[in-house]
Image: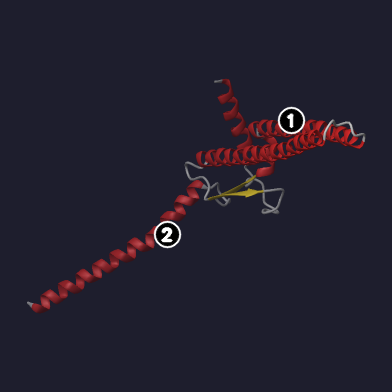
Amino acid sequence: MNKAQIVINVVLVAAVAALFVIVFSSKPEQKQVEVAAVAPEGQLPVAYVNLDSILQGYTFALEAQDKLMTRQENARMELNQKARTLQNEMVDFQKKLENNAFLSRQRAESEQQRILKKQQDLENREAQLTQEILQENQQLQAQLADTILSYLKELNAEGRYQMIFSNNAKDNILLSVDGYDITAEVVSALNARYSSKGKK
């Protein structure tokens, strides 16, 4: 009876081992079949987008960039105008000081303090505008990145690609055959989505 149990145990161990071999050897083949079904014949399941081209072709990016540039120009105009006014007041103060036009030393010092405060206010305003524009630019970049990534996830919902690379002016991908660059497809889809949101 012990011999019968040993034989049964040996058979069971062999059966379990055979089962493990079948299961683990069949998995890679199934994965290869799945990848082959997703990727076009003879093409790797990868793609890339040219971010420079997206920024030059995506309507939202162009409009946002124009808005940011207008904001920068307006800030520059405001600061230049205030700087000219301050410069004129400083020149006027210097002339009055040289011609002893102030009725008292206290009046001259008071005017000097007013001009120095105006200069400090101008410097503070410049720092504030610079910070605001920097924050707007960072928000724009984050929004663009989020929009592009969101669309790429949607595009690849069915597992068409294993990887999608980004490229900037041929920095990362120096050469590729046709079919791997999906920039035009992405720009077209992003513009269609942006246009439809604008109409609502």
Residue 47 x %, y %? 59, 48
Q: Earlier in the sequence, mark 1 or mark 2?
A: 2
Residue 83 vs residue 159, the one in the foreground: 83
Instruction: Specify whether 98 is left or right of 45.
Output: right
- Residue on which the image places disc 2: 28
Q: Is residue 120 above or below residue 192?
A: below
Instruction: Specify whether 194 is left or right of 83.
Output: left
The crowd level at tag 2 (other Cα within 10 Å; few <14, some 14-19, many 20+) is few
Instruction: Specify whether 69 is left or right of 148.
Output: right
Indicate how the structure is coloured in the image: secondary structure
**Label at residue 83:** none
Residue 45 vs residue 88, the one in the foreground: 88
Residue appearing at x 56%, y 25% in the figure: 197
**Label at residue 74:** 1
Residue 18 x %, y %? 29, 67
Residue 108 x %, y %? 81, 35
